Image (tube, rainbow, N blue to C red):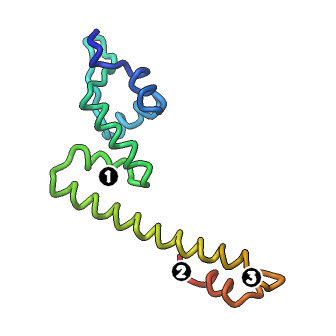
Amino acid sequence: MSTLLLRIGEAAERLGVSTHLLRHWEATGVITPLRTASGARRYDPKLMDALSIAIKCRRTGMSLDAIARLLNGRRRERGHLIAEQRDAINRQRARLARTAAFLDHVLECSHPVVRECPSCRDFASTAS
């Protein structure tokens, strides 16, 4: 067997994921590994690169459907998917910044009960 083609366990180990995850991503159309004559999965360098991208995209919260379209779609669709994900990340950053500011306030809040503080109530009543 060529060293360029990895078995599923080898691929999973190199990527730091489970074999179950690789099988799931195959079943959902994210990836399509090569198959031997006996049906065993094989992972070539190109597929390993695609999986590395998929893992990073998944960490950003991108859906498996979007990742599959990113990896297998046309360039125009990829641009749209990336723009959507970038915008979602920026919205999440803004929410996290507001929450961090609130937590900083709570550390310094002089009210004996957080619910009695006008700033805390304002934070609680704002949309996420």
Numbered mark located on residue 66 in the image: 1
Q: Quadrant of the N terminus?
A: top left
Tell me which amino acid carries mark 3: Cys
Q: Which residue is mark 3?
A: 109
Q: Which residue is mark 2?
A: 127
Q: For the point 55% across and 76% down, which residue is it? A: 98
Task: Tell me where residue 101 sits by quadrant.
Answer: bottom right
Distance from disc 1 to disc 3, alpha carbons, whole Å, reads 43 Å
| Secondary element at tag 3 | loop
Badge 1 density bin: few <14, some 14–19, many ≥20, Cα 10 Å: many
Distance from disc 3 to disc 2, alpha carbons, whole Å, reads 22 Å
Distance from disc 2 to disc 1, alpha carbons, whole Å, reads 27 Å
Q: Earlier in the sequence, mark 3 or mark 2?
A: 3
Q: Can you give x and y, in whole percent of width and height, for residue 52 in the image? A: 35, 38
| Secondary element at tag 1 | helix
Task: Tell me where residue 21 sits by quadrant.
Answer: top left
Q: Earlier in the sequence, mark 2 or mark 1?
A: 1
Q: For the point 37% across and 49% down, which residue is it? A: 57
Q: Can you give x and y, in whole percent of width and height, for residue 86 in the image? A: 34, 63
Q: Can you give x and y, in whole percent of width and height, for residue 89 in the image? A: 41, 63
Q: Can you give x and y, in whole percent of width and height, for residue 49 in the image? A: 29, 35
Q: Earlier in the sequence, mark 1 or mark 3?
A: 1
Camera-near label (1 vs 3) is 3
Instruction: Give the farthest residue toward the bottom.
Output: 118
Instruction: Give the farthest residue toward the top.
Output: 1
Tell me which amino acid carries mark 1: Ala
Q: Is residue 126 above or below residue 37?
A: below
Which of the two residues, 126 or 102, is positioned nearer the viewer here? 102
Pointer 2 with pointer 1, Cβ within 8 A: no
Which of the two residues, 83 or 73, is positioned nearer the viewer here? 83
